[in-house]
Amino acid sequence: MYEKDEPKALSEVAIQKMIRLEVKHARLNRRILAQQVL
């Protein structure tokens, strides 16, 4: 999926941003699930 000319650093930053978003969503989902259980 990655462009071959794309600088490696740029793609690494994009991956880190995606990971941070995933972590945020996971935390939100956990909170919502916890509230539903209680």
Image (tube, rainbow, N blue to C red):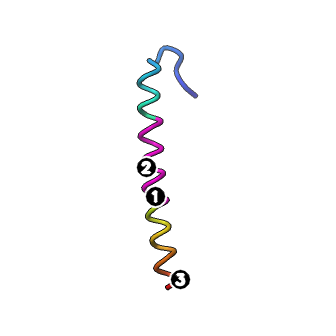
Image location of residue 27, percent across then percent down: 45, 62
Does label 3 or label 2 sit earlier along the sequence?
2
* SS of the residue under disc 1: helix
Relative to 30, say whether 12 is above or below: above
Say the numbered circle drawn on residue 21.
2
Question: Would you call the spot at circle 1 few (<14 residues within 10 Å), some (14-19), or many (20 or more)?
Answer: few
Image location of residue 7, percent across then percent down: 44, 18
Say the numbered circle drawn on residue 2.
none
Amino acid marked by disc 1? His
Question: Would you call the spot at circle 2 few (<14 residues within 10 Å), some (14-19), or many (20 or more)?
Answer: few
Left or right placement of residue 1 versus residue 15 in this view: right
Label 3 sits on residue? 37
* SS of the residue under disc 2: helix
Question: Predominant secondary structure in magenta?
Answer: helix
Q: Is residue 28 magenta?
A: no
Q: CA distance from mark 3 to mark 2?
A: 24 Å
Q: Is residue 25 magenta?
A: yes
Image location of residue 38, percent across then percent down: 49, 85
Does label 1 or label 3 sit earlier along the sequence?
1
Residue farthest to the right? 1
Seen at 49% across and 66% down, the residue is: 29
Image location of residue 5, percent across then percent down: 48, 14
Evaluate if marks 1 and 2 touch, with contact meaning CB atoms under 8 Å apart: yes
Say the numbered circle drawn on residue 25.
1
The magenta segment is 15-26
Nearer to us of marks 1 and 3 is 3
Name the image quarter holding the N terminus: top right
Q: CA distance from mark 1 to mark 3?
A: 18 Å
Amino acid marked by disc 2? Leu
Relative to 9, say whether 30 is above or below: below
